[in-house]
Image: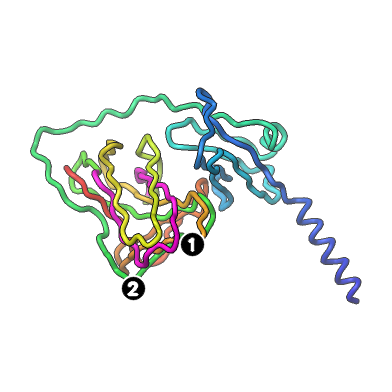
């Protein structure tokens, strides 16, 4: 009986391995050949994805996903999409994937001559007892909130959040801003990566947004993205109950989901 059970388990394991496929490669700039760090790679609409490392390299394990679409994207570059089966046949482990810089002109923003007002928009909680964190340790995991504006156009000048507990290790994140469509994040607003390094023991995150010239005409979504493995236990942000939904996605190309009843303490200093 034990021998039969062992054979059955072995057959199942072999079947699973036969349907698992590891895809890997490296990504560079098509113009300069420079290796691109922190590029998002994932299956569209699925919780399967990762981010390139410091050398532009990635590895991703798939399970019978040949008919799915694999998307490779990064702020400032034209994204590429492949059928998984095509990627495995033409690129996997043998070629460098090149992304072309996105040279589209920035959308013109009308700035009015009135004297601007300045205020904090969003959730300003600094709670040490109510907290929320990333929903998984997968690279590309993203968490954030929708923030409403008071007048258009609004200039985003500084991002702020508090940590409910000091960071246990240095962590690198990416700060993202999106417009909102049908209550969910839609297209990215900024044209440059905004990297954030949270140092061990740090209790607050403040990011100067002035160099990025981010203007919004309506409510927007702001998020932090997990882009580098850490030895620590993650980052826990201050939160407050019944103060709006947290919106998250498992990896960079996954669907957005509303989670929990606590609002994450993300806010921005803005002028309008």
| Horizontal side, residue 19 vs residue 255: left or right | right
| Horizontal side, residue 120 vs residue 97: left or right | left
- What residue is drawn where x is 71% and y is 47%? 21
| Horizontal side, residue 62 vs residue 246: left or right | right
Verify whether residue 172 appears in magenta.
yes
- Quadrant in which the N terminus appears: bottom right
Gap in Å between the C-alphas at discs 1 and 2? 20 Å
- Residue 46 location (% of width, % of height): 57, 50
| Horizontal side, residue 62 vs residue 38: left or right | right
The magenta segment is 157-182
Mark 2 neighbour density, 10 Å: few (under 14) some (14–19) many (20 or more): few
Instruction: Give the labeled residue for mark 2.
Output: 129
- Residue 104 location (% of width, % of height): 39, 25
- What residue is drawn where x is 49% and y is 53%? 141
- Residue 44 lies, with reference to residue 89, above or below; the image says below
Instruction: Give the labeled residue for mark 1.
Output: 232
């Amino acid at each position: 009986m034990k021998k039969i059970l062992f054979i059955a388990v072995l057959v199942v394991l072999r079947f699973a391995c036969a349907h698992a496929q590891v895809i890997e490669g490296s990504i560079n700039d098509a113009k300069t050949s420079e290796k691109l760090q922190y590029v998002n790679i994932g299956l569209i609409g699925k919780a399967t994805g990762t981010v390139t490392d410091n050398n532009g390299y990635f590895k991703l394990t798939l399970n019978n996903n040949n008919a799915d679409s694999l998307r490779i994207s990064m702020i400032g570059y034209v994204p590429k999409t492949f059928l998984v089966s095509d990627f495995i046949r033409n690129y996997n482990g043998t070629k460098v994937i090149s992304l072309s810089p996105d040279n589209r002109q920035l959308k013109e923003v009308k700035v009015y001559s009135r004297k601007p007002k300045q205020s904090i928009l969003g959730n300003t909680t600094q709670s040490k007892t109510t907290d929320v964190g990333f929903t998984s340790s997968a690279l590309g995991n993203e968490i954030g909130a929708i923030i409403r504006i008071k007048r258009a156009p609004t200039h985003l000048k500084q991002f702020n959040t508090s940590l409910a507990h000091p960071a246990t290790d240095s962590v690198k994140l990416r700060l993202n801003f999106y417009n909102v469509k049908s209550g969910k994040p839609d297209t990215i607003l900024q044209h440059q990566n905004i990297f954030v390094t949270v140092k061990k023991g740090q209790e607050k995150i403040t990011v100067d947004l002035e160099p990025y010239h981010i203007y919004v005409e309506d409510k927007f979504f702001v998020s932090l993205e997990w882009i580098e493995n850490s030895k620590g236990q993650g980052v826990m942000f201050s939160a407050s109950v019944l103060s709006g939904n947290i919106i998250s996605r498992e990896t960079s190309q996954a669907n957005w989901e509303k989670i929990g009843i606590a609002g994450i303490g993300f806010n921005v200093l803005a002028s309008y």
